[in-house]
Image: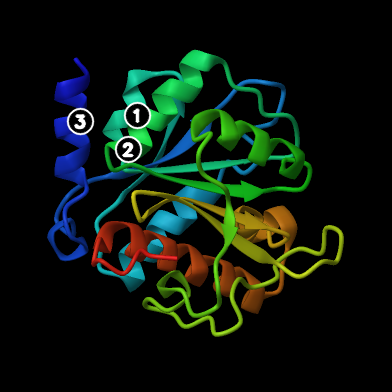
Amino acid sequence: MHKQLFAIIFLCLLPFTQIKAQNIKLALLVYNGGGDWYANPTSLKNLAQFCNQNLNTHFDTRQAEVAIGSAEIFNYPFLHMTGHGRWALTDAEAKNLRKYLEAGGFLHIDDNYGLDPYVRPALKQVFPEADLVELPFTHPIYHQKFNFPNGLPKIHEHDNKPPKGYGLFYKGRLVCFYSYETDLGDGWEDYDVHRDPAEKHIAALQMGANLIQYVFNLNGTNNP
């Protein structure tokens, strides 16, 4: 069964220029532990629409929701995770997520304020041998369609710390990007939800589009 699912995900993870005619959904990761994984219900819809308009993709704008322990995660090349609270992994879930990331999948974790204390311990369960590292502002993820010479944009204040982007690498490939003290997902939401200034809403979507382009490009530049 896993071989079939691996084949599906590798078909999805074609070079960026080859996915433009495909109907791929962005998926929201459903996790356990008590955190509100459902916190930003309009964010992925808006990100998909923005990418379709600005990157000439053809994403299905209906968000998928997929459980972290399910084999269904192998159907989605891009997983987005958010929330304010606790994230707890069983051994089986950690193993499943590792297989997914090893197979070519990508996980974006966005701290919605309160998730941070659980991110590193959970990822250590998944990849005990690897550590999150802060990505330099020169990393290609900040220089795709849109240029962010100073790294992540600051969308919400939280603890009034500078935003930081961390990466987890497996065999030289960036498999997980963790955005902290920025709250990109809130910035992607419908305007009426948070009423962010227009420039912050656009900056959040532009950075999200950079993530999408970087992930699907697979252009050999995904090194620390």
Mark sitting earlier along the chain (3/2): 3
Relative image position of residue 40 (x, y in whole percent): 62, 44
Q: Secondary structure at mark 2?
A: helix
Give yes or no for contact between labels 1 and 2 (Cβ–Cβ under 8 Å).
yes
User: Is residue 88 visible to the viewer in this orientation of the structure?
Assistant: yes
Tag 3: amino acid:
Phe
Residue 197 falls left or right of residue 137: right
Q: Is residue 172 above or below residue 89?
A: below
Tag 1: amino acid:
Lys
Q: CA distance from mark 3 to mark 1?
A: 9 Å
Q: CA distance from mark 1 to mark 2?
A: 5 Å
User: Is residue 189 visible to the viewer in this orientation of the structure?
Assistant: no
Disc 2 crowd rating (10 Å Cα; few below 14, some 14-19, many 20+) is some
In this rendered view, identify the residue nearer to me: 224 or 44. Answer: 224
Q: Which residue is mark 1?
A: 99
* Residue appearing at x 72%, y 67% in the figure: 196
* Residue appearing at x 57%, y 67% in the figure: 204
Q: CA distance from mark 3 to mark 2?
A: 10 Å
Residue 120 falls left or right of residue 212: right
Numbered disc in front, either 3 or 1 = 1
Tag 2: amino acid:
Glu
Relative image position of residue 67 (x, y in whole percent): 47, 23
Residue 102: assigned label? 2
In this rendered view, identify the residue nearer to me: 41 or 89. Answer: 89
Relative image position of residue 97 (x, y in whole percent): 43, 29
Q: Secondary structure at mark 1?
A: helix
Disc 3 crowd rating (10 Å Cα; few below 14, some 14-19, many 20+) is many
Question: Which part of the image, by quadrant, shows the C terminus?
Answer: bottom left
* Residue appearing at x 48%, y 37% in the figure: 28
Work out which residue is located at the far front of the displayed protein and give it.
129
Mark sitting earlier along the chain (3/1): 3
Q: Which residue is mark 3?
A: 6
